[in-house]
Amino acid sequence: MARIAGVNIPTNKRVEIALQYIHGIGAHAAKEITAKVGIEPARRVNSLTDAEILQIRETIDKDHTVEGDLRRETSMNIKRLMDLACYRGLRHRKGLPVRGQRTHTNARTRKGPAKPIAGKKK
């Protein structure tokens, strides 16, 4: 197994698919990386040489924010919004939808399971 950005990449998959196992690299970024390195996206990971894997690793380190750094950056952005006490920060703090979705009904994913109301009967 090739190890790139702290993630074990599956060896029997195509390079452009295997790169997407890294948090922060999607389909577009994977194609961009393979084009920059000069590797055909349809090649399998097990057919790559150590030099090619090293090139991929260097390209990702240089041009992309991935894995722990990306997660940390995202959580710091959310924490900053919460510290500012802006509308989005308050919604994050209360555990409600942030992007304007309705909450009268639905929004159960964000709000968690429904809490029963005492005395309410059907």
Image (tube, helix red, strand yellow):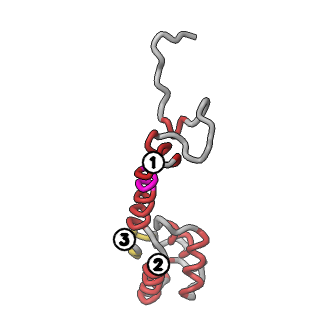
Q: Quadrant of the C terminus?
A: top right
Q: Mark 2 highlights which residue?
A: 60
N-terminal of the pair, mark 2 or mark 1, is 2
The answer to if 12 sits in the magenta stretch is no
Q: Secondary structure at mark 2?
A: helix
- Distance (Cα) linking label 2 and label 1: 35 Å
Q: Is residue 1 visible?
A: no
Which quarter of the picture shows residue 35?
Answer: bottom right
Range of magenta residues:
78-82
- The label nearer to you, 1 versus 3, is 1
Q: Earlier in the sequence, mark 2 or mark 3?
A: 3
Which secondary structure is most common in the magenta stretch? helix
| Residue bearing mark 1 | 85
Q: What residue type is disc 2 on?
A: Ile
Which residue is the site of mark 3? 6
> Which label sits in the foreground, 2 or 3?
2
Q: Height in image: 101 above or below 5?
A: above
- 104 versus 35 height, above or below: above
Q: How many marks?
A: 3
